[in-house]
Image (cartoon, rainbow, N blue to C red):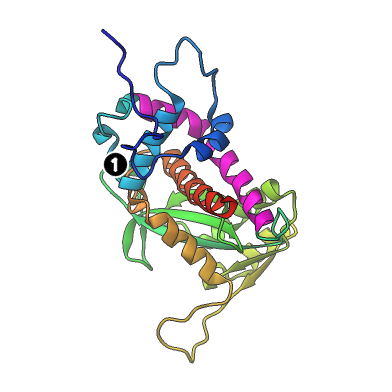
Amino acid sequence: MAKKEFRTGSGKTSYSSDVSDEEWAFCAPYLALMKEDAPQREHSPRAVFNAVRYMVRAGCPWRMIPNDLPPRQIVYQQAQRWIAAGCFEALAHDLRKMLRMLAGREIHPSAVILDGRTMQSTPESGERAGYDGYKRKKGSKVHAAVDTLGHLLALKITPANEQERAQVADLVEEVQAVTGGKVEIAYVDQGYTGEEPAQEAMAHAVRLVVVKLEEAKRGFVLLPRRWVVERSFAWASRFRRLARDYERLPTTLAGLHWLAFLTLMLNLLTVKSS
């Protein structure tokens, strides 16, 4: 029986989430965990990558990946290998540097914005879910650091009951690691107030600046600097798999966030380069 061929995304019948030829040329070196012609390879890496992107963008379960894409068990296993190897993170960091250069910025930012987003739990994630009393929601919390353009720098997943201020040390440490210690200021909301988070940030040479909402104002207010990270979370929520926490493993949830952000940056890079 002839081996079934799965489309790679370069044909007319491709999904809108498929990578273009130009995008794949950029991504392929980061995803090559083995040789292209390795004897144990059964499916094209591009076809598998397209399948993972489709699942995250459309929000379908792993078991419901379309039949014209590689089998779901192959897609899941390869996605886990890419996540464990940090492939999506490496892609995202290099894309961020290129976009900053195209925008006339330094490749590493001197300022970042920190915030947390609570994701509603599901039966798959329920065992590790926590209750966020402020949002009145049970689930997981995504703690993120973005640069002033909204591109992801660092990410951490915790139960929703864990406070944002308790994650400052880990986020700032990771931010400084990926920027070579270039960050000097981190803008945060009032959930990060207190001496302890400020000291933890200062231990990594970062000054924590709390952007407060003026008490005299009512309704929606666009806060300086703070709106950038909210926009980044809005970008991520367009990927339906990230609308709720459908993952059993927090590492998978984090990895899919990196995939979503690198997808956004890849699209932006293609537009700017055209």
* Residue 247 visible from this viewpoint: no
Query: Which amino acid, mark 1?
Result: Glu
21, above or below 169, in the image: above
Q: Is residue 194 left or right of residue 45?
A: right
Count neighbours of disc 1 (C-alpha within 10 A) and say few if under 14, some if 14 to 19, many if 20 or more: few
What's the residue at 60%, 70% (across, down)? Answer: 194
Q: Is residue 101 left or right of residue 9?
A: right
Name the image quarter holding residue 30.
top right
- Span highlighted in magenta in the image: 74-102
Is residue 80 part of the magenta span, yes or no? Answer: yes
* Residue 96 visible from this viewpoint: yes
Q: Is residue 245 left or right of residue 267?
A: left
Q: Position of residue 75 (x, y in %)?
A: 37, 29
Q: On the rendered image, what quadrant is the N terminus found in?
A: top left
Is residue 166 part of the magenta span, yes or no? Answer: no
Name, please, the residue furthest toward the bottom: 216
92, above or below 116, in the image: above
Q: Main secondary structure of the magenta part?
A: helix
Camera-side residue of 131 and 98: 98
Which type of secondary structure does the marked residue at label 1 adopt? loop
What's the residue at 53%, 77% (across, down)? Answer: 223
Q: Position of residue 133 (x, y in %)?
A: 36, 65
Judging by the rendered image, the residue that carries numbered circle 1 is 124
Q: What is the total number of numbered labels drawn onto the structure image?
A: 1
Q: Position of residue 184 (x, y in %)?
A: 73, 62
Q: Position of residue 11 (x, y in %)?
A: 37, 34
Camera-side residue of 193 and 26: 26
What's the residue at 49%, 36% (across, down)? Answer: 21
